[in-house]
Image: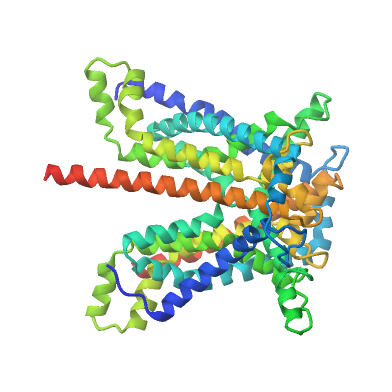
Amino acid sequence: MTKKTSLGGKLYTALVFIFLYAPIAVLIVFSFNSGKSTSVFEGFSLYWYKELFNDAATLSAFKNSMIVAVVSSIISTVMGTAAATGIYNYKNKLVKTSIMTVTNIPMMNPEIVTGVSMMLLFVFIGAIFGKTGTLGFPTLIIAHVTFELPYVILNVLPKLRQTDPHLAEAAQDLGCTPLQAFFKVMLPAIMPGIISGLMMAFTLSVDDFIISYFVSGTTSQTLPIRIYSMTKRRVTPDMYALSTLIFLAILALLIVSNIISARGDKKLSRKGGSKK
Amino acid sequence: MNKKSSLMSRLAGAPYIVWAALFIIVPLCMVAYYAFTDNTGAFTIQNITGLAKYTDTFLLSIWLGLVATVVCLVIAYPLAYIMAQKGPEKQSTMTMLIMLPMWMNFLLRTYSWMTILEDTGLINTVITSLGFEPLQLINTRGAVVLGMVYNFLPYMILPIYTVMLKTDHSLVEAAQDLGGNKLDVFRNVTIPLSVPGIVSGFTMVFVPSVSTFYISQKLGGTGTILIGDIIETQFQTANNFNLGASLSFVLMILIFVCLAVMNRFSDDDGGVIL
């Protein structure tokens, strides 16, 4: 159903989008400012981009972010897919609902509480073994895997429900071992859910500040933590340059993924058409 | 499925169950443990009873969170409604445009408002160049609410829009056929059917707003200290884990109570429709 939006509706939509994008536009414009001011434009320059690329701490934070995101999203995707298969096959309803309730906790709980609770656990364990600097890369990865897992499970479970359970049985009747049946039949069927879970886990990991802030310690800064420590000082346009680059990267990613999915839709509709 | 394969698929869930127990359940028990012990490890309820002096902070956090959530709802609802009426191509473009700012780090999004609202920021530069007195924009409660609304608005738009999209349009048509005018249909059909979206949007905006500390630090100055700020201080600078844990414990319970009340509302409304 498509109706013409009234003039008022169009105006309203435009206003909301201006609200959403005005601050981003300000960031982008002033990232090219030759002066230090963030309110008076003095002239075009790429000075702040050069500053940014000469900033070793920011670059190493970026590297850390990527490492944590790749490692944690792979672990959470593998474990989460296995978990979804398990949960799907549990017959006992009480077990099923209690697992799902626990799975929902990291999504419902305020992030600050999740971060604090994990920090307390790590510090407590460290205290038992008489160590002080327990926070670092390993704890960062454990925390990221933990908050990514629910999203992976919730992306994979619906795909399992949509898949015909008789498929795996048929494969086994035809001589596959249960494991082969899973990898050859079930896995391809639930692959779209696994991929979207992996992508979500990755982006959540790159973007996370609050939980990382409590479990990272002083040695393993991620990019958001670096941004936090830089925005503690006076405002300078090198952070604007960073924001602009991040914005462009996300824009490019979104456009590419939209094109891919649009092509997929076209293929699908062509296939459907030829069947008829 | 035969026994062997079902046993195997059940075992597949085992690593996750162990992981969830270790890193979801145990940490929450640690919060409770620290909340009810002093720094020597002895049991005490003084941390919790001592929270009375933070009552105002709790109330302010909940109040600002509520205001931000309601403002988000008021802005988001008409937009979601307009979006749901559009054709599929426009819809996917608009969804993308709403998600795009969401994917930018919220620290940077908040930071950009800081530079707009500052005393020598963009707005005040324009105002003074026009010959008016500069306004006090930053370090106000309004600025904190603005920051919350700006950061979390997409979380309100998208769930409402999704629910409206799934709504069976024949219900709206039926109501019109039965003689309802536009306003009646909107009030008695469209709004009740979108309640699940409103509830999940409400949750997704309210929880991060109440527990934020970055937004209040950057936009609220020293005058607007929220519960998140106090928790952050205990863990990052004051090193008073017991106080921090008891604050987190109470915050968690408060939020779960709020969410339970919200879910009650949506269930009741669901009952009315049926």
The x, y position of residue B121, in whole percent, is 74, 69
The x, y position of residue B23, in whole percent, is 63, 35
Color style of the picture: rainbow
- Please give left or right for residue A167 compared with residue A34 in the image: left
Quadrant holding the N terminus of chain A: bottom left
Figure check: B59 above or below A217: below
Residue projecting furthest to the left: A276
Of residues B146 and A255, the one drawn nearer to the viewer in this rendering: A255
User: For the point 71% across and 76% down, which residue is it?
Assistant: B126
Figure quadrant of residue A191:
top left
- Please give left or right for residue B122 compared with residue A269 in the image: right
- Please give left or right for residue A123 compared with residue B190 in the image: right
User: For the point 32% across and 60% down, which residue is it?
Assistant: B88
Of residues B222 and B263, the one drawn nearer to the viewer in this rendering: B222
Figure check: B102 above or below B164: above
Figure quadrant of residue A5:
bottom left
Of residues A176 and B153, the one drawn nearer to the viewer in this rendering: B153
Of residues B61 and A205, the one drawn nearer to the viewer in this rendering: A205
Figure check: B271 above or below A198: below
The x, y position of residue A179, in whole percent, is 36, 19
Residue B271 visible within the image: no
Residue B109 visible within the image: yes
